[in-house]
Image (cartoon, rainbow, N blue to C red):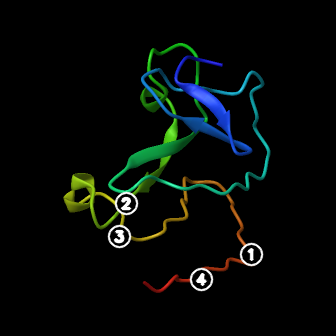
């Protein structure tokens, strides 16, 4: 565990300066489910497919951004947040099923 991370009320929480953390094990087929909470005005993220050959996790992984949409300046970036959900066709047969999207009203 890197400096800045600690267990607080049963959560892994970043509370002070430090760095990103990654799992010891690498995963290729998995389902990830978690709960998250961001501080008021906060910005963070969950990265998938991270490799250790770069100094920052965002150099290799894809991000699900965690953002206070009302108070963080990044919410004004045209590439953040509202957008389409994409399923990629890359030349090979691919199938998707039981896709469910539930919008959360403010």
Question: Mark 1 — residue?
Answer: 97
Q: Disc 3, disc 2: CB below 8 Å? A: no
Residue 54 image point, x, y percent? 47, 16
In depth, the one of 17 and 35 nearer the eye is 17
Whether residue 57 sits left or right of residue 23 in the image: it is left
Q: Quadrant of residue 5?
A: top right
* Disc 2 target residue: 68
At mark 4, the secondary structure is loop
Query: x%, y% of residue 58?
Result: 44, 32
Q: CA distance from mark 4 to mark 1?
A: 15 Å
In the rendered structure, are the residues bearing label 1 and label 3 in contact, judged by CB atoms less than 8 Å apart?
Answer: no
Q: Earlier in the sequence, mark 1 or mark 2?
A: 2
Residue 6's place in the image compared with 77, above or below, is above
Q: Earlier in the sequence, mark 4 or mark 2?
A: 2
**Real-space Cα distance between discs 3 and 4?**
14 Å
Mark 3 = which residue? 82
Neighbor class of circle 4 (other Cα within 10 Å; few <14, some 14-19, many 20+) is few
Give the distance between the C-alpha atoms of the residues marked 4 and 2, in whole angstroms.
19 Å
């Amino acid at each position: 565990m890197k400096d800045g991370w600690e267990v607080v009320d049963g959560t892994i929480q970043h509370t002070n300066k430090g760095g990103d953390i990654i799992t010891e094990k690498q995963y290729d087929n998995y389902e990830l489910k978690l709960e998250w909470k961001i501080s008021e005005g906060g910005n963070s993220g969950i990265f998938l497919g991270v490799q250790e050959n770069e100094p920052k996790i965002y150099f290799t992984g894809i991000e699900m951004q965690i953002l206070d949409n009302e108070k963080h300046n990044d919410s004004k970036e045209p590439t953040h947040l509202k957008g389409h959900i994409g399923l990629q066709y890359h030349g090979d047969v691919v199938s998707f099923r039981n896709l469910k999207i539930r919008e959360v009203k403010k």
